[in-house]
Amino acid sequence: MATTYSISDLAQEFELTPRAMRFYEDMGLLQPERSGPGGRVRVYSNRDRARLKLTLRAKRLGLSLNEAKELIEMYDSPRDTGPQLRKYLQVLVGHRAQLEAQRAELDATLAEIAQQEKEARKLLARQQPGRTRRAAA
């Protein structure tokens, strides 16, 4: 018999809310079976668990949910993994470049802030001649 999971099982395992799980389902990332009266009970398979794990990994890497979905769906037909791996590598390279550009912008902003702090301290020290330079800092 295949292992199945409830929405609360997976939500707890991956530290998500049931609402987040339903959102991933609405996005087409998860496709649980339905059971119970009116099909209100979601029953997740090992496949859903693996897809959720891949989705969360993609989020940590900075991929959008649409990018995650596209990549995950490519892995659903694993005959030739070459195209999937090339696409995954392309996405990773793009995100690395984006993050490195953001880091450069942050470094420049931090350098500017440091310079402005230095100037403000100099001006403050000139206004308070009785204080030592060290006390002003």
Image: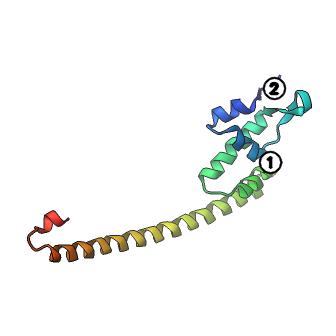
Q: Which residue is under mark 1? A: 26
N-term-proximal mark, 1 vs 2 = 2
Examine the rendered structure and indicate whether residue 28 appears above or below residue 3: below
Residue 35 place in picture, x, y as percent: 88, 29
Along the line of sight, the residue nearer the viewer: 90 or 34: 34
Is 36 on the left-hand or right-hand side of 96? Answer: right
Does residue 133 sit above or below 2 in this rendering? below
- In the image, taking residue 72 as reference, residue 90 lies left or right, namely left
Image quadrant of residue 109?
bottom left
- Which residue lies most toward the top here? 1
Residue type, numbered disc 2: Ala
Residue pictured at 51% horizontal, 67% vertical: 102
Q: Is residue 100 above or below residue 29?
A: below
Q: Quadrant of the rendered structure where residue 43 is?
A: top right
Whole-percent x, y for residue 134 in the image: 14, 64
Residue under numbered circle 2 = 2
Q: Quadrant of the N terminus?
A: top right
